[in-house]
Amino acid sequence: DAMVIQNPRYQVTQFGKPVTLSCSQTLNHNVMYWYQQKSSQAPKLLFHYYDKDFNNEADTPDNFQSRRPNTSFCFLDIRSPGLGDAAMYLCATSRGVRDSPVGEQFFGPGTRLTVL
Amino acid sequence: DAKTTQPNSMESNEEEPVHLPCNHSTISGTDYIHWYRQLPSQGPEYVIHGLTSNVNNRMASLAIAEDRKSSTLILHRATLRDAAVYYCILGISSGSARQLTFGSGTQLTVLP
């Protein structure tokens, strides 16, 4: 089945220690998104890629970076995690609006990040 | 950003219809109305979308007001598996992608 896969499902890191979360997709979608979801809150968009074009949300901290080496993979790098970065990180994909005006997004199961 | 307003929580009895309301008074002409839901410990999943006309799919129906400033998601027969947070979202075109700005959502509880 075509899907969005996130690894690992649970990640523990130490305060200030860089961490990378990964996302892969078999849907061949142009667009990949990263969201942050803190406890009891709605998902918040951090950034997205359309192919290799990176689009950062204005209020995304510089501590968060992303890489997309190819269509299938996208990484979220947190350079110096703080306690406030503990959250669920969700990856999603969609077709671009030229192919799909609605842009239905397909989400992965998320990676829950704990910062000690 | 165009925003949506939803009740924080709603309850329904199993096997009964559920109407989940959403206000989006600042909607613009090209904004699609999306509904997603998030089951516990899972990523959000698409439920339905619409632009101007009412829509039906296997999961739900979407009723859109004539002025498009509000909409209602209808689950025809709620099951225990429908217990989730339901998000009403305006899909904003951001260049080549459709950007979703999630509001606080409605926590639906389904009672047996």
Image (cartoon, rainbow, N blue to C red):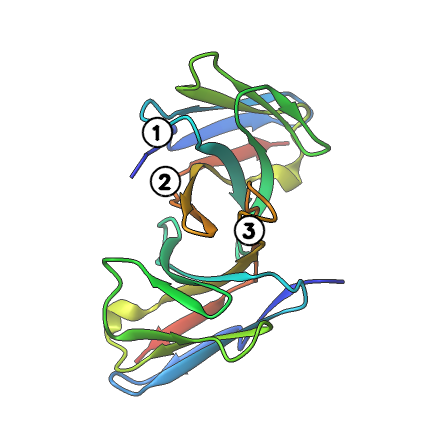
At 53% from the left and 57% from the top, the residue drawn is B41
At 50% from the left and 27% from the top, the residue drawn is B11
What residue did someone put label 2 on? B103
Q: Is residue A95 left or right of residue B106?
A: right
Q: Chain of mark 3?
A: A
Question: From this viewpoint, which residue is outermost toward the front?
Answer: A98
> What is the spatial separation of the Cα atoms under label 3 and label 2, in whole angstroms?
16 Å
What residue did someone put label 3 on? A105
Which image quarter: residue A24?
bottom right
Q: Amino acid at mark 2?
A: Gly
Q: Residues within 10 Å of mark 1 (few under 14, many from 20)?
A: some
> What is the spatial separation of the Cα atoms under label 1 and label 2, in whole angstroms?
7 Å
Q: Is residue B53 left or right of residue B92?
A: right
At 48% from the left and 11% from the top, the residue drawn is B66
**Residue B87: percent from the left, percent from the top?**
46, 38
What residue did someone put label 1 on? B5
Q: Nearer the viewer, residue A55 or A5?
A: A55
User: Are discs 3 and 1 both within one chain?
Assistant: no
Element class at badge 3 = loop
Element class at badge 1 = loop
